[in-house]
Amino acid sequence: MCGIIGYIGDKKASEILISGLSHLEYRGYDSSGVALCCDDKTYIYKAQGKLNNLVEVLKTKEDICSKATKGIGHIRWATHGLPTTLNAHPHTCNCKNFTLVHNGIIENYQELKEELLSYGCIFQSQTDTEVAAHLIAHEYGKTHDLLKAMQNAVKKIKGAFAFCAIHNNEPDKIVVAKRNAPLIIGVGEGENFIASDIPAIIEYTKKAIYLSDYQVGVVKKDSIQIYDDNGNLVINKVEHLPFEAMAISKMGYKHFMLKEIHEQSDVVRNVLSGKLIGHDNKINLDEFKLTQEKIKNITRVQIIACGTSLHAGLVGKYIIEKFANIPTDVEPSSEYIYRDTIADENTLVIGISQSGETADTITAIKQVKEKNAHIAIITNRADSTMARLADSLLPVNAGIEVSVAATKSYMAQLISLYMLAIYLMENKGITKFDNEIKKIKQELIELPNKIEALLENTDNIQKIAKKYSSYKDFIFIARGINFPSALEGALKLKEISYINATGYGAGELKHGPIAMLDENMPVLAILNSGIVYDKVLSNCEEARARQAKLIGVADYIADKDKDLFDDLIIIPPVCDLLSPALNIVVLQLLAYYIAEYLGKDVDQPRNLAKSVTVE
Ligand code: AGP
């Protein structure tokens, strides 16, 4: 979603702002803008569409770009008002002395706007951000102090915000504030940075201060001062940023998505490292903070997540119920919020999120935290808002995921859920699966090699992708533990190719979706050699009888059944319970190559954002 960058120092601000914004592009956006300061004046440049459009505008402003050593920048993902140049940030006030960029949503913007209109404020855009700009500028009119103006204004604002503000009368500073939206201050020498996410500044500094909710900061080129909501000066720890600049390079791959798909074997090794040491040992999960006694008392598990993370949660339900014998519900966070959910101190709530910043999931977690449930967070961002809400933080350490379509983070979430399910089982003293678990642990150890074997030869998948890339609709079917694989495979395809793809439990096909089947609706069936093989095969027969083209994804297909399929993708042999981790690699690749043949913007699909920070 939206992204913020700010710079104050001696270097060319325009270059740092554009480079920072380019590293936030992956989050999804529809317009961009910068404000550059020199000679006690502020120059605002904006453009609709890709960041390159803004770069082209700046090429014509070389005089300003060469002089400005302070500036703020933004990429916008439209919430209030169309994705136009006018609505792009930065926004300003009547006198144009004050300039603001903003991430988040001002919930009471209508009310504030009416008040500001009565003071004579003139609005140019349809955005909620412009209301905040006028409000802070109005407070400045009373205080003549940017810090005080920000402190007064944020008290009147309801909603979520990360603000980065400048005023022509105070050229030596940038003032920042945040509530329920991330903002960090990158610490440099003789220069400082501001960003909504680490990739924007990682090439310049590895030291940063995380601003907390309700704090306001004054950033100068050689000092940073932070104030709490009572106006007291506070000291925030300077933290070491966990990423290498290398992590945001494509490393020779055409797209980040393809690179991230190929990183999955190492991702599995990372998650297993230190937790699974040989198939005879118990799972070691120090990060999980519930005592054995409390684990035995867990009466229910609730998994809350969105999108791909939700699909990982559905696999989690299957294995937690099977091994740990605890009733498990999985629900999209956006629905969980609006139910009178039942939870108490014996409830384990598992929040899953790649970004750790998904607004729906944060709200759901905050809501259930009040009921004293134990909150475990599985996230790729140990520095995120969600991580800070965790009683048990289970970081998946998949490395930064740049492609909007999640791939390696899904893999990391799956493996973490296997670890957690087996850990719960072992701590509850359940022994009846001992032999099966030994086999699964051994297969988990072998999984990275199998993923690598699959990735070594993708010719067949590429050929099939090309053959089916002109279809407009797709159905994915599976049963049991692979039902979520069908949902996730369909989600990947629609996200990056815009083909209408839907995942169904294979048994549900005949209860409605079968009506859509004909030669124009390919069906992709996931059939592993486990308990549901024969049943999914019957569902494939039903599809075939309606002339649907059939693609099978399986670790084994009996010779007698092969003719049923138009195309087959065979994965390395794997036990049924671990098969989602291999099947998904095939489905990710299929989606990738279809989108690639169609010439789509694979890493930044239209309308999507990497981290969805609005409810
Ligand atoms: C995944 O490909 C999607 N971009 C999306 O569904 C994503 O999984 C969802 O928005 C949840 O994000 P999170 O994992 O960061 O919470």
Image (cartoon, grey):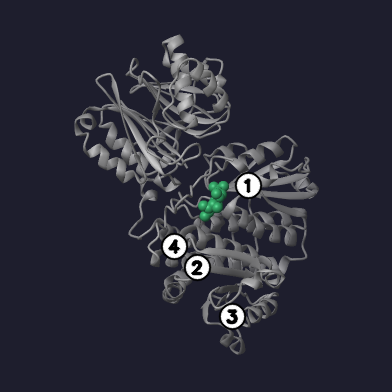
Label 3 residue SS: loop
| Amino acid at circle 3 | Tyr
Rendered location of residue 475, percent (x, y): 58, 69
Pair 4/2: label in front: 2
Q: Is residue 230 above or below residue 197?
A: above
Label 4 residue SS: helix
* Res. 200 image quadrant: top left
| Amino acid at circle 4 | His
Among numbered discs 3 and 2, the one appearing first in the sequence: 2
Among numbered discs 4 and 2, the one appearing first in the sequence: 4
- In the picture, the disc for residue 262 is 4
Q: Which residue is mark 3?
A: 556
**In the image: residue 177, left or right of residue 206:** right
> What residue is at 47 percent from the left and 40 percent from the top?
78
| Amino acid at circle 1 | Asp
What's the distance in space between the residues labelled 4 and 3, CA to CA? 23 Å
Pair 1/4: label in front: 4
* Res. 92 image quadrant: top left
Q: Is mark 2 within 8 Å of ligand 1?
A: no
What's the distance in space between the residues labelled 4 and 2, CA to CA? 27 Å
Discs 2, 1 touching: Cβ within 8 Å: no
